[in-house]
Amino acid sequence: MKRVLVVDDDPGILAVASKRLQMEGVETFTAGDGAEGLRLLRQIRPDVVVLDLMMPKVHGFTLIQEIRADPMLSEMKIMVCSAKTYATDIDRVLQLGADRYLSKPYALQEFWETVAELLGDNRRLPFAVRFWGTRGSIAAPGPSTIKYGGNTACTEVRCDDQLLILDAGTGIRLLGLSLLAEFSRRPVKGHIFVGHTHWDHIQGFPFFAPVFMFGNEFTIYSLHGAEKPLEKIFRGQMDSDYFPVRLNDLKAKLTFCELESTVQLGAVEVSYVFLNHPGLAIGFRINFGERSVVYLSDHEPYWRLAPNRGRPNTMDQEIARFAEKADLLICEAQYTDEEYEQKKGWGHSTFLDALERAAEAQVKQLAIFHHDPSHDDAFLDGIANFCKNTIADRNYAFTCFLAQEGQSVDL
Ligand SMILES: [Zn+2]
Ligand SMILES: [Zn+2]
């Protein structure tokens, strides 16, 4: 991980600059004056130090001289950000050995691009999604569901070296085996985000092999249940009436986190939105730098249940805003419009609902997910065609596919 030290006596600048650097996956340190800056940069030896000039205790000019006089710090890049824009000052800074000069106030994008250039870091960090279970309601294995898959909801998201898992349906069993093979003897650490605790979203958890091993660590995030705490719900499904191993007997370190606000995991930010589904359900948005994945499963449009089926519906608009401009929207859709009439109030969308939601949110790519257990591969191929034709007829600007078990998407 690249390291950047920001030295500035303005706490507001330290806060916004370090937040932006963290969003880009940079390990960030801050110092509020020149003396502290000098101490820290000798201690941590960052790849880039970002300096103000007019600082208490040690002036920026002195700091640059100290760095350039120290052979141990010869690799360090220096970027000066100052409100002093006299040509003589800028010349002086560069003569003393600074690599770049940026005048304040600066735009955060320009700030980041300058730091990235100094880091020699033009690469995009890996950001990928892999589907391990795409089925809704109940697993539906068999010869007629081989293409789209029979396992229930589980999606792996990798943001550089962070492992996130969306839902713990039966697909998580296969993910567990894959992780053990990949990590070999190294510990597996991950964050499991559960949209809601219906069977098809948690039932694979007791079969997730990494939780049976010491040294592994997982945090499980969702809401406090309607009646029970999150941990109690997970404990309940492993009660001896249902399963031979108790939650307490699992060897991995497990932490249950009932969400109250956005979660920041290094450079990754995960926020949530309430969905329209029987009981409590939430969808997630994962922001990683400029890129994002939104996961909305399970959800029935509010307008469909409103007394007059009036549109636009402000609650639906809020969901579209949550998903706005996502690089990938993973969205549930379980029925055709005809099938829906028999399934109204079950908490799911039609295929057309998902397309309209993606269009309203102006996403780049839509993955339809949570396939109905009664829909075989041939039927879903037909739905994929229906989606393609609808997108063409309506001139929608996004691409769409039906998620398949084992499929990966790079973002
Ligand atoms: Zn479901
Ligand atoms: Zn459900």
Image: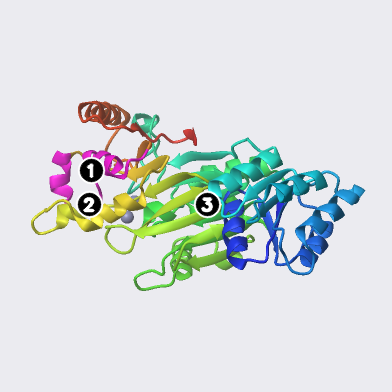
Badge 2 crowding class, 10 Å Cα cut-off, few under 14, some 14 to 19, many 20 or more, is: many
Give the amino acid type for the residue marked by disc 2 in the picture. Answer: Pro
Q: Would you name the residue on which mark 2 appears?
A: 301
372 on left or right of 330 = left
Q: Would you name the residue on which mark 3 appears?
A: 207
Instruction: Identify the residue shown where x is 57% and y is 45%.
Output: 110
Is residue 298 at least partly visible in the picture? Answer: no
Give the amino acid type for the residue marked by disc 1 in the picture. Answer: Asp
In the rendered view, would you say 219 is above or below 25?
below
Whether the magenta-drawn stretch holds residue 346 is answered as: yes
**Which residues make up the magenta segment?**
337-363
Callout 2 touching callout 1 (CB < 8 Å): yes
Q: Is mark 2 within 8 Å of ligand 2?
A: no
Give the amino acid type for the residue marked by disc 3 in the picture. Answer: Phe
Q: Residue furthest left?
A: 308
Badge 3 crowding class, 10 Å Cα cut-off, few under 14, some 14 to 19, many 20 or more, is: some
Q: Would you name the residue on which mark 1 appears?
A: 353
Query: Front-most of 239 and 193?
Result: 193
In this rendering, which labeled residue sits more in front, label 1 or label 3?
Answer: 1
Q: Element type at marker 2? A: loop
